[in-house]
Amino acid sequence: MSVITNKKVMLDVRDIMVVANIGRTNAYELMKSGEFEVKKIGNKFLVHEEVFQNWLKGKPKTKKRW
């Protein structure tokens, strides 16, 4: 049985703006920079919260297994 929480798993540009304390243009540039893996769904850019936190901490980008 899984527990549902209100914590976001995927962060969008607005979340990146708040966490990194940057503006919208810089947030979009960061999401498009290739520094970490980003998913684009429709017009929305999303990054996994753990991936972004690891990037902020300076941990190296993880490689895909496939």
Image (cartoon, rainbow, N blue to C red):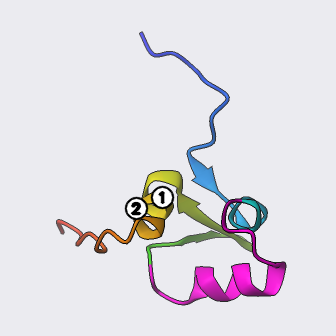
Q: Nearer the viewer, residue 56 or 30?
A: 56
**Badge 2 element:** helix
User: As drawn, is 8 to the left or to the right of 2?
Assistant: right
Residue 2: horizontal and vertical position, in percent?
Answer: 45, 16
Q: Identify the residue shown where x is 80% and y is 87%.
A: 25
Residue 16 position by quadrant: bottom right
Check disc 2 and give the amino acid type: Asn
Which amino acid type corresponds to the residue marked 1 in the rendered image? Gln
- In the picture of the structure, the residue carrying the numbered disc 2 is 54
Q: On the rendered structure, is 20 left or right of 58?
A: right
Q: Are marks 1 and 2 in contact (CB under 8 Å)?
A: yes
Q: Position of residue 7 (x, y in %)?
A: 63, 34
Indicate whether residue 24 is drawn in magenta: yes
Quick one: label 1, few (<14), some, or many (20+) residues within 10 Å? few
User: Magenta segment, principal secondary structure?
Assistant: helix
Few, some or many residues within 10 Å of mark 2 (<14, 14–19, 20+) = some
Region rendered in magenta: 19-35
Of all residues, the one furthest to the top in this rendering is 1
Distance Cα–Cα, label 1 vs label 2: 4 Å
Looking at the image, residue 6 lies above or below residue 28: above
> In this figure, which residue is indicated by the disc labeled 1?
53
Residue 21 lies, in percent from the top left, at: 74, 69
- Displayed quadrant of residue 47: bottom right
